[in-house]
């Protein structure tokens, strides 16, 4: 009897294991979802720094219809270093780096006259008091140094030959030191509406910032013409440089409320394009360009203006 009971149990278990799994799904409306989550819509939190080696904007056909050679603008680490350093965007907590934490609150609405839309509100986590961007450069690159896609085949390329030595068809045009953006107590926010946009624009900004490159004389920015040894990025760059500093007026934060952005055009006129602007008058601000230098430091010629 015991052996028969064991066989019955094994048989039942086998039938259970080989039985097809069937799940019944039903739609969950906004009211049911709110009852489950305790809020209206969804909130998604992301904590992650952004890091990349090279970011390219590629133009496949040039300035005129009959010009077919490819070229691109590439953002990458500073040229001339022994090894390639990635460009990093991270959060700030005081003066220390932290994970860049962002909350996205997502909801939908039918709107009026069937003009439905999705509303996405973006805000920074409580511990994030700013954003830090590591030093980087902007380059102009020709086709031989750009990645490409042919059908389903992706071919990766680099603007550097080894380390951060530039290839012959690449030109460094802009070099930027590290950038710190410090938030005000009323941190920046962004509200995005997709579909219809009853707020009037695709993106509306809010909150405020205290400074951009607000420490010391500011962040160094250089328009690169050449190098101390022509064409050798391992030597000192030559060009026009200055230290950039942006702060709110008389210690007050610079408000972002009123700024907007989006893809817009007048009805029936043109395909449209990216628009960034401000409704009305912005807050006052202080903008400084310090230590302006044209050419090479201490390289003076008495007979040249």
Image (cartoon, grey):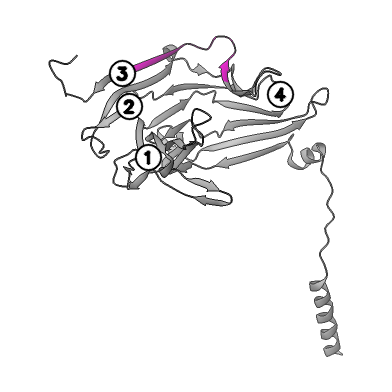
Vertical arrangement, residue 36 with respect to residue 250, above or below = below
| Separation (CA) of disc 2 from disc 4 | 40 Å
Q: Which residue is drawn at the image coordinates 42% and 11% (left, top)?
A: 250
Query: Which residue, given by chain and number where applicable, does mark 1 sit on?
Result: 77
Left or right of 240 on screen, residue 305: left
Q: Position of residue 73 (x, y in %)?
A: 44, 34
Residue 197: assigned label: 4
* Dominant SS in magenta: strand
Instruction: Tell me where the magenta segment starts and ends, as one range.
Output: 276-291
Query: Which residue, given by chain and number where applicable, does mark 3 sit on?
Result: 290
Visible residue check, residue 274: yes
Query: Which residue, given by chain and number where applicable, does mark 2 sit on?
Result: 222
N-terminal of the two: label 2 or label 1?
Answer: 1
Vertical arrangement, residue 273 with respect to residue 156, above or below = above
| Separation (CA) of disc 1 from disc 3 | 24 Å
N-terminal of the two: label 4 or label 1?
Answer: 1
């Amino acid at each position: 009897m015991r052996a028969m009971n064991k066989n019955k149990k094994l048989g039942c278990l086998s039938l259970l294991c080989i039985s097809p799994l069937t799940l019944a799904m039903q739609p969950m409306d906004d009211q049911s979802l709110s009852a489950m989550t305790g809020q209206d819509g969804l909130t998604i939190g992301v904590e992650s720094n952004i890091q990349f080696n090279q970011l390219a904007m590629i133009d496949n056909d040039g300035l005129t219809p009959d010009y077919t050679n490819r070229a691109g603008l590439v953002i990458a680490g500073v040229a001339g270093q022994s090894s390639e350093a990635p460009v990093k965007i991270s959060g700030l907590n005081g003066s220390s780096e932290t994970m860049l934490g962002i909350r996205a609150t997502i909801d939908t609405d039918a709107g009026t006259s069937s003009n439905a839309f999705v509303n996405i509100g973006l805000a920074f986590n409580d511990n994030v008091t700013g954003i830090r961007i590591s030093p980087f450069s902007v380059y102009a690159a020709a086709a031989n140094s750009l990645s490409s896609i042919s059908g389903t085949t992706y071919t990766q390329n680099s603007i550097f030959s080894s380390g951060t030595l530039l290839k012959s068809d690449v030109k460094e045009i802009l070099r930027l030191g590290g950038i710190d953006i410090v938030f005000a107590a009323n941190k920046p926010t962004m509200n995005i509406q997709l579909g219809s946009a009853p707020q009037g624009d695709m993106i509306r900004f809010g909150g405020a910032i205290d400074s951009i490159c607000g420490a010391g004389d500011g962040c160094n920015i250089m328009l690169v013409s050449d190098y101390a040894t022509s064409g050798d990025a391992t030597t000192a760059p030559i060009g026009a440089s200055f230290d950039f500093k942006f702060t709110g007026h008389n210690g007050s934060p610079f408000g972002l409320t009123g700024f907007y952005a989006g893809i817009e055009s007048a009805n029936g006129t043109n395909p449209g394009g990216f628009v960034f602007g401000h409704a009305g008058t912005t807050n006052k601000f202080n903008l400084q360009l310090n230590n302006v230098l044209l050419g090479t430091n201490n390289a003076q010629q008495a007979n040249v203006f």
